[in-house]
Amino acid sequence: MSNTADFGFTADTLEWKSWLPVLDVAQATPDQAKVLEESHPKAKTSDYYLLLVQEAEVLRQRSKLFNTIMYGPRGASRQDRELAASAESRMNGCPYCLSVHAQRYVQLKGDPALMDRLVKEGTGAEMDARSRAIVDFSVRLSETPAAATAEDIATLRGFGMKDEEILDVISSVAMFAWANRLMQTLGEPYRA
């Protein structure tokens, strides 16, 4: 199995392996099976979900929160949420989450060059001013939340973002600041 140092950051598809025992789906309780069904289409084959479902209610609440933040019908566009999650994951050092969100961003926005630069060069990579504002805000929120200021909000508003869109960016960053740290303490990414 490879570790992060072996392949660095990538937009290629990565897998994730738990360092702790995961649930054997054949041994799932009815509630665990239900939570896996509710959580994600690949939950029954994902070490991450099979580890977390051992506390079924925790995974249920985590999945509700994730789905609301990332797929909610109002507020920020999906690509803005994915850009924020990508920036947070790159800054926070989570190759697995970065690969997932980079791919989603490119699928939604169709801008592989921007994401390629963010993946390879980091959050300081060259990008258009609006994307830069989202990335800088995301990094400040992740590194030191109190470092984000009213000026950051004003900058985002200056690009036409409404308050509910800014709230979605904040929620995306917060979700992945937590999720990255959880994944990085429970297992590691690898190339299949």
Image: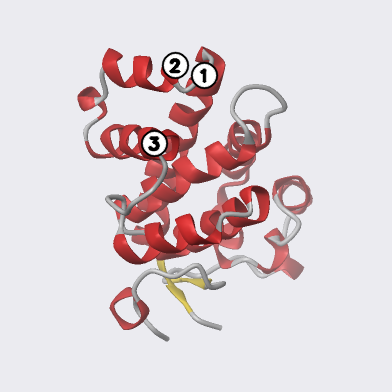
Q: Are marks 1 and 2 in contact (CB under 8 Å)?
A: yes
Residue drawn at (30%, 40%), measured in percent from left and top? 139
Residue occupied by mark 3: 129
Where residue 58 sits in the image (x, y, percent)?
56, 40
Does residue 175 lie above or below 191 as drawn?
above
* Three-letter residue code for mark 3: Ala
Work out how far the residue at label 3 is from the one at label 2, CA to CA, in angstroms: 13 Å
Report the mark closest to the observer, 3 or 2. Answer: 3
Q: Is residue 162 left or right of residue 107?
A: left
Does residue 59 lie above or below 20 as drawn?
above
Q: Is residue 14 left or right of residue 173?
A: right
Where residue 60 sits in the image (x, y, percent)?
64, 40
The answer to whether one can see residue 113 in this image is: yes
Residue occupied by mark 2: 157
**Among the 4 quarters of the image, the one containing residue 13:** bottom right
**Among the 4 quarters of the image, the one containing residue 42:** bottom right
